[in-house]
Amino acid sequence: MLPFFRKISKYIVEISIIFIGVMMAFLADNWREENQDSEDYRKIMNEIENNIRLDSIEMVSDKSDVIKQIECLDMFLDDSHWEKEKIDGNQLAPCFRLMLFVDWPDYVLTGFNQLLSSKIVTEDYDSELMFRIYEYYQWTDFHYLRIGQTVTETYDLQRYLINNEFYPEESDAFTQGEIEVFQKLRVDAVFRTQLKYLRANRKEELRIYNYMQDRTQLILNLFRKAK
């Protein structure tokens, strides 16, 4: 019996050594994977932070353009402006061009795309920060949809102007003849309605820009707290 127990003990020791070795290798792999996930998370979040910082800078310029466009549309719709004895062609031409200009927002998505394609389980990390990031990029999608609506309204307006044979050459000022034609066109019911639709879209864009600026500041503050 003794040799039998010795043989069994030997097998148990060998199996135990193998088991311990496998477990150590498994734990080491898990440790390396967790470290790699943490490093990937850090790099991706740094990229997202830089992206949002760039977005916040770009928004200042884009928002300024939208405000100017609204001011131009207000001028075109304001009857009192056209009751003046002399309309300023130097003011009218730039406003006219700006009214028909649509600039797509230039959100930087490299970091968020990396996050979406990574194997990182985002629930394991800062839930508040991650929630705000996903919320932010949902709003960028919505913003693109709204800009698409503005593009449609702008193209409709451009086609209407062309059909009415009014589309001045780019210049620093309207000629007196162009001013007179535009004065007649702006009292046209269809044209005024299109201006109102375009203004409503610009106002919605301004609201989105204000909201997005608030979101960028909130997220950047969360990044600072997380460091």
Image (cartoon, helix red, strand yellow):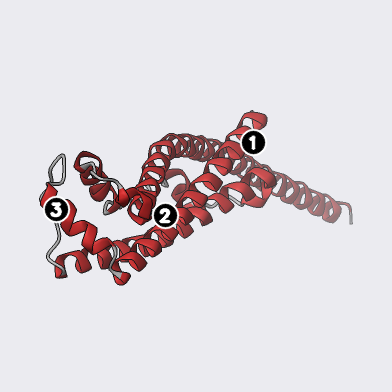
Residue tagged by mark 2?
Answer: 202
Q: Nearer the viewer, residue 85 or 185?
A: 85
Q: Position of residue 96 (x, y in %)?
A: 25, 50
Instruction: Name the quarter where the N terminus is drawn.
Output: bottom right
User: Considering depth in this image, is 153 or 184 the residue closer to the camera?
Assistant: 184
Q: Is residue 213 visible?
A: yes
Tell me if I can see residue 36 in this picture.
Answer: no
Q: Residue at x 64, y 36 (%)?
A: 222
Q: Residue at x 29, y 64 (%)?
A: 187
Q: Earlier in the sequence, mark 2 or mark 3?
A: 3
Find residue 225 and report its image quarter: top right
**Element type at mark 1:** helix
- What residue is shown with label 1? 222
* Disc nearest the viewer among 2 and 3: 3
- Look at label 3 and name its amino acid: Glu
Mark 1 to mark 3 CA distance (whole Å): 53 Å
